[in-house]
Image (tube, rainbow, N blue to C red):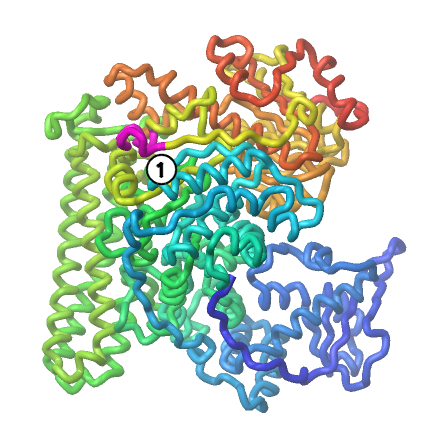
Amino acid sequence: MPSETTTPPAVSTPPWQAQAVWVATAPDGELRVAVFPPRVPATTRLILCNDPLPFLELLEGSTEAAQWLVIDLATLFRLLHPESAAAGLAEMLARIEGDMPPEQRLWRLWLRCESRLCAFPLWALDEVAAICQALDDNELAALFRLAARQAETRRDALRNWTDTFPATVRRVERAAPPDLADCSAVDAAAAVALLDQDGALARCVAGYEPRPGQLMMVRAVVEAINAGRHLLVEAGTGIGKSLGYLLPAAIWSQLNDVPVVISTNTRNLQTQLVEKDLPSVQRMLAERSAATACGEPPRPLRTALIKGRGNYLCLRRLAHQMEQAPGELPRRERRQLAAVLCWAVHTPDGDLDTLAAGATMEQGIAAQLNAHADDCAGHACRFYRRCFVQKARERAQRADLVIANHSLVFTELGATTPIALPRHAQIIFDEAHNLEEAATRHFSTELSPARLATLARRLASGRGRRRRGLLERLRRRFEGGTLRQSAAVFEALMQELDAAGADVEALRRDGSLLFRRLYDLLPAGGTPVRFAFPAATGGPPAPPPAPDDRWRAIREAQASLEATLLRLIAGFKRMIDRLAEAAADELNLLAEETADLTGGIQALTSLHTDLADVLAAADPASVFWVQRATGPEPLAEAWAAPLKVGPLLAKHLYEAKSSVVFCSATLSVGGRFTYIGERLGLDAIAPGRLATCLAPSPFDYARQCTLLAPAYLPDPTAADRSYITELTILICQVAAGLGGRTLCLFTSYDMLRQCARLAEPALQAEGITLLVHGESGSRDLLLRTFRQDSRCVLFGTHSFWEGVDVVGDALSCVILARLPFASPGDPVFSARCEQLDRDGQPSFRALSLPAAVLRLRQGFGRLIRHRGDRGLVIVADTRMLTKPYGATFRRNLPCAVQVCESAAGLLDHLASYASPSPSPPAPTA
């Protein structure tokens, strides 16, 4: 995929002689040392070690040791490659291919570090050296200073840090797409032929076999776009869904010179599209005969990946961090800043997702450095032409296919002039089964301690030399600029900054008081509480509000917080007026400060508006609730969310676009699209404008998969712990019989944690590693470990029910702990159920059951990802056998259920997948 790239200076000759040293304790307790290369010049100064402390103790008193710079290589690698998901040295070394001793692997790892280090611009070497020195990491500081001295000899040494990021933004606005009548239709037969037995893909991929479901999907997408219809496509697992819509979209885009937007729900799918599927489309279109048959011009397909601005590094915010002396930053932030700088000099697109994926990066680092609408100075920003956000938008404007995410698409719904996306008439939603949830999340309003704390921190934080934030930056600029020449203006601005600083402290106090008062609404268990004021709205009845004295205290705290927000807004406006008075010829010099204050006003105004709207609870089309906030303190947060997203989508999407295509492996219930159509408001589409397609999976589930239902388990809804105990015994027995290779999907963290505590000792006794979602590392790390080590059992919830793609022998069994009904305590879900019941639609049949069926199908789909995969799915919930609705679940699974009346009967089924080993000791309750 084409993208803007930074241009690091040419790699120079290293200014050191180096040697890798591997230190290990032998069985006899003696320290053993191995080196690579075995012979190095006497001038060697740099030692790269796996464990420096015992090595230095070994050399204590040596005259040579005083000349050596001994570096912990794992620490250096993490600093130079912060985007790496490798958490420790063992994982770093494991990624080096080839059979070699550990000291040679260590050397190979060093060469990767050396290559990056020698390509660093001079400014970065100086900055990181200063930070390392402030962290008392003298060895790393010395290494970076050595590299800096060498960099000074290069002609292309970059001393100004901004020169690392090319100034290339030339924004081009895409014209509005033509009417459908003025577009050329795609030849459906020719498009399908590209994927047929003798088509372009077959010529590009050895051993390619066409899949009937994929050909059916391609034809359906082409016909929908040609006719200006919307389309629902259920693409069975394994048909190649992505190519099924990417190919028609690419041909249409090039044929008519219009952009098509592809929207996904997850970062993983975006990565797959960019790295795997789009190159395949490029290769197919490069086949001259196929290109001629479809009529598109021979130019390369232009593609762009774009995310919301919050996913990109803001150079302006990075500059604010760098303007502070290293000693002014908290120690933890210094180390993170050094890693960010090492990443920033090499990032091609400023995508913070790649940095956040690093094993050693704190999740909050993106929030400190990402681009933010309220912080953006726009054209007034001195980094505007170097801005990663603007570059991404420029690429999107020029692209044929634009890969976006649901949240970004929703942000631009209804906008007269799109900001990030080019004007488009065709959009394709992949992972469309998540669309209602994604829309609900996007259109929700949050009043939380985290939101207020983030805003307050942006305005002012810290004390003394460590004061930070917008107010401190403005103070430093005013004191160091020409405003001092106008004494009256300067003094007025200083007074306003002092007053604003006091108001920020009041903002924190008032916010904390409000969130404590909201916490008083929660019951002893802390479950969410809905609230509404139907007398004011004339809307449907709501749960009875809390006693008046609690709400009276909430209103008093709300009034105090609103007054503080209004004082801050007024003070910021006065500062803008003072800047305008300073001098007409200085306005350009003060444009960035004015933009900063304007952004602050926008953020404060947004919070003030949301505060009033949410606590008024006056919109009958929304649901309002209070829930416990994250953290140890007794604080709560208030939320508002739309009861229905369908009307919003119908107005701004279905009526505004020529074609909207919805794709997923799970959209239908019982072969019908009624449920998803009602949830997404597709029933509002004019007759004849909505088409559907059920593209079957190529997998032979009856041959590849065994679906088991253990009838002997207790009812999972029973009040006692018997189900947890019996489920854990089942998991351990299956895992022992298969030697790991088991994915267990839960519907709640509480059940997952209980089972994990019981199962871990029994699994350890069998030499099986238990990986636990939320405890054993990030989702990506868990999946990578699970794929690489077959003797693993992975416990996951929520996000693991979908998007998990483990091919081959690494996964042989999926255990579904419970039927995945939504929690009745979920405020949005319960409000929607009540709304359906009031409208005369039984909510269980209209919402609860079909939603759970789609979720179960997603979980089932984790097992078979390839024609060669085989395994078992165990639905460990007896309600699928005993309840009347169980038949609905059974009918919607792709193979017949085999009922197991005993544990022995269930374990007999393992024989065809692995030789069972003796059962592990049963876990104790």
Q: Position of residue 125 (x, y in %)?
A: 54, 78
Residue farthest to the right, as pictured: 28
Q: Of 605 and 260, which appears nearest the observer?
A: 260
Horizontal side, residue 248 vs residue 865: left or right: left
Q: Quadrant of residue 821?
A: top left
Q: Which residue is mark 1?
A: 230
Q: Of 700 and 366, which appears nearest the observer?
A: 700
Is 340 situated above or below 814?
Answer: below
Label 1 environment density (alpha carbons within 10 Å; few <14, some 14–19, many ≥20)? many
Q: Residue at x 77, y 64 (%)?
A: 105
Q: Amino acid at mark 1?
A: His
Q: Residue at x 37, y 65 (%)?
A: 394
In this picture, which residue range is highlighted in magenta? Answer: 679-690
Q: Position of residue 90 (x, y in %)?
A: 71, 55
Q: Residue at x 24, y 51 (%)?
A: 415
Q: Quadrant of residue 460?
A: bottom left
Residue 904 can be seen in this image: yes
Q: Position of residue 858 (x, y in %)?
A: 52, 31
Asked if the stretch drawn in magenta spans residue 785, the answer is no
